Amino acid sequence: MHRRSALQWFGSITAGTVLQPSATLKALGNSYDNSKFQIDQLNGASGSEEDFWLQIRQAYSVSASIINLNNGGVSPQPRVVQEAVEFYNRLSNEAPSYYMWRIIDQGREPLRDKMARIAGCQADELAFNRNSSEALETIIFGLRLKAGDEVVLTKQDYPNMINAWKQREHRDGIVLKWVNFNFPIQDDDEIVSAFAKEFNSKTKIVHITHMINWNGQLLPSKKIADKAHAMGIEVLVDGAHSFAHIPYSIPDLGADYFGTSLHKWLSAPFGSGLLYVNKSKISKLYPLFAGGDPESSDIRKYENLGTRSFAIEQAINHAIDFYEMIGPERKYNRLYELQHYWTEKVKDHPNVQINHPINKRYSGAIGNVVIKNKKPEDLASFLFEPYKIHSVAINWENIHGVRITPNVYTTKHELDKLVKGILEFADSK
């Protein structure tokens, strides 16, 4: 929970220990135990659920001057993750080529095993990179598509992915088939049928954004994937906003390929991402950064990034520990509770329009709200000026509003200020 917990462990690593890679990595791997004990104690202690979340808040270096409700862009890291990055970085700088390549790099395989535990897949189906865009573009540019092959995607997908597909269209002559939704939608059949209507014998892959980043709409990935697989169509899932947010195992989504950013809902260091490729597909998918054998069946061929920050990579361990301490279901329930809390207080105002699903089956932390006949930018500015609430205005393909994204450290008192601001703006002339 507290900074000193990690520092006590880090400070206990002697020069003699550092020269023994296995001992060093074991000590660093255990650096979270003191913090874990404190939260385990809190879990078993008497008191309200709110007491628990107030303690979680203390694990973050939360700003005292603004209320951050744009965690959908990128999430902050708990203090222990920040300090792990600093420690690994300082260690690397003592003798970079020695500590980076001979010491810290040895932690990647234990990290891969650890990540596989929360991802619910085999370790040799996971590769580490820097973000969702890199993971998904590895897939998009690595697929063996030719002129005339069709790809199904939506107008509401993330811009980087849309641009990547458009580049393949321009370069290789593939055909993009677009689905255009008017979210929110709380009906699986409506969503699935819209995708399936575009499937035909020329369709090679479907791109599914599991959670739409603009408004938090959750798509029934597995049902879409089942329709696709029945026609021999491969499935790519963009899990940037659902991973470590919604409890699931990657294979449960029906994904052949999957990418996510760990610096979003896992609260891992900035610039950390994850690529999943079903084991049977690895040899056929080219890496984005070339290695010795582009047709290797080893997932590690996707990690030929050259020199990168091993400090960021190894600190992912501590983000996983923090996530597991809270628990996937408990975290999801809290995130939805926070979204539901403010939504219920504003949704019945005649000038307020809610752009995200209300039903928990289709939703999580991310919400989107707009005041009728007013611009999203004006609401976002109003929330910041008097209330110092940081949010973001969204204007993208049938979705126009202000995205509101709390996180586990957000308090209901802060959301009461949000509610006051929204209602005040809704009443203004």
Image (cartoon, rainbow, N blue to C red):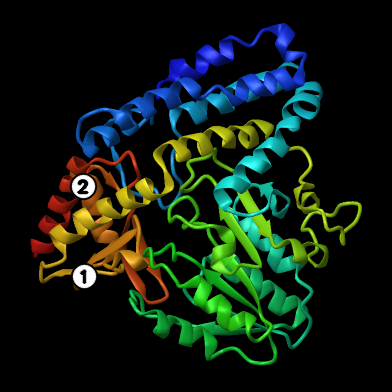
- Residue 154 visible from this viewpoint: no
Task: Name the residue type under label 1.
Answer: Gln
Work out whether mark 1 precedes mark 2 in sequence or the reverse, and give the earlier one: 1
306 relative to 194 in the view: left or right:
right
Q: Are marks 1 and 2 in contact (CB under 8 Å)?
A: no
- Residue that appears at 54% across and 57% down: 249
69 relative to 198 in the view: left or right:
left
Task: Name the residue type under label 2.
Answer: Leu
Q: Position of residue 157 (x, y in %)?
A: 51, 70
Q: CA distance from mark 1 to mark 2?
A: 17 Å
Label 2 residue SS: helix
Identify the residue position indicated by label 1 in the image: 353
Q: Is residue 330 above or below residue 66?
A: below
417 or 295: nearer the eye?
A: 295
Q: Position of residue 33 (x, y in %)?
A: 50, 23
- Residue that appears at 46% across and 17% down: 5
- How many residues crowd mark 1 within 10 Å: few (<14), some (14–19), many (20+)? some
Determine the image quadrant of residue 208: bottom right
- Residue that appears at 77% across and 13% down: 19
- Residue that appears at 62% across and 40% down: 114
Q: Is residue 351 above or below residue 247?
A: below
Label 1 residue SS: strand
Mark number displayed over residue 252: none
Question: Considering the image in quadrants, where does the C terminus appear?
Answer: bottom left
Q: Is residue 23 above or below residue 396?
A: above
Mark number displayed over residue 415: 2
160 or 177: nearer the eye?
A: 177
Q: Position of residue 3 (x, y in %)?
A: 44, 19
Question: Considering the image in quadrants, where does the N terminus appear?
Answer: top left
- Residue 168 visible from this viewpoint: yes
Q: Position of residue 336 (x, y in %)?
A: 30, 55
